[in-house]
Image (cartoon, rainbow, N blue to C red):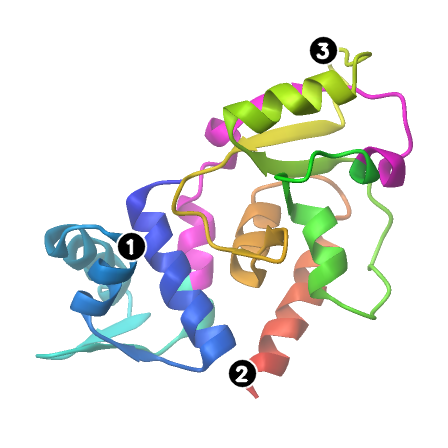
Amino acid sequence: MTKTETIWHLILNTALHERKFKLTQAQIAQTTGFSLSTVNAAIDKPAKIGAIRKETKFFVLQDVFKLLYFWASNRNLSADIIFEASINMDIQSVESFMPDNIIYACYSASKYILQHNVPPADYAKVYVYSDNTTLQQLKLRFPKLKRGDNNNLFVISKSQHLITTKGHTTLANTFVDIWNLSDWYADDYLKALEERINELLS
């Protein structure tokens, strides 16, 4: 995930979960450790399409969904996948055997985000974020991993700036990542996550 994406992620997460839509570039720079020029460049792009309104001393996220879809359309999830394999196990067992430092993503994360709601569809693939150290632990836990055309485990590179929520990706991050998947059930999850976003914004 790029620095620009990390900034968009932070803005969306702050709006959805802290209900703060008015921020300063200095706040973003301090939180992320990025330079002000990096923050300014990241904000300038969605400002041009009306997702963000820039003022003299602050900026306002004025359209959550516009920024969310702008990020989704710019996200290159496949480029961040550092490992994929096939495991001859049911999905629930694969998830339960994961190392502690794994961050559940996509469909697995949706189960936590949607809380008590029944997942909109069964899924056949597990996506997780991991650093290289944890990836090696994962490989040891699943000694019969196979590489092929029918892979059902996908490991995404975990940035040091990744914002997470109790072991899984945030609502915004989960939505954006699923938006980049072609599985037939992805649309069902996107609709359910959109409903969750609307609940938080209401």
Mark toward the start of the polypeptide (1 vs 2) = 1
Please provide percent x and percent y for residue 88.
89, 21
* Above or below, comparing residue 106 to residue 51 in the picture: above
Please provide percent x and percent y for residue 73.
44, 48
Residue type, mark 1 in image: Thr
Q: Residue at x 36, y 51 (%)?
A: 6
State which mark lies toward you, 1 or 2: 1
User: Where on the picture, by quarter, is residue 180?
Assistant: top right
Left or right: where does residue 188 sit relative to residue 12? right
Start-end of magenta stretch: 68-94
Residue type, mark 2 in image: Leu
Q: Name the element at disc 1.
A: helix
State which mark lies toward you, 1 or 3: 1
User: Where on the picture, by quarter, is residue 61?
Assistant: bottom left
Q: Which residue is mark 2?
A: 201
Q: Name the element at disc 2.
A: helix
Q: Residue furthest left?
A: 56
Q: Which residue is mark 3?
A: 147
Report if the CB atoms under discs 1 and 2 are less than 8 Å apart. no
Please tell me whether residue 77 belongs to the stretch shown in magenta.
yes
Q: Residue at x 63, y 52 (%)?
A: 168
Report if the CB atoms under discs 1 and 3 are less than 8 Å apart. no
Please provide percent x and percent y for residue 202.
57, 88
Q: Which residue is mark 1?
A: 32
Left or right: where does residue 101 sit relative to residue 60? right
* Above or below, comparing residue 181 to residue 56 in the picture: above
- Give neighbour class at mark 1: few <14, some 14-19, many 20+ (Cα, 10 Å): some
Residue 129 seen in this snapshot: yes
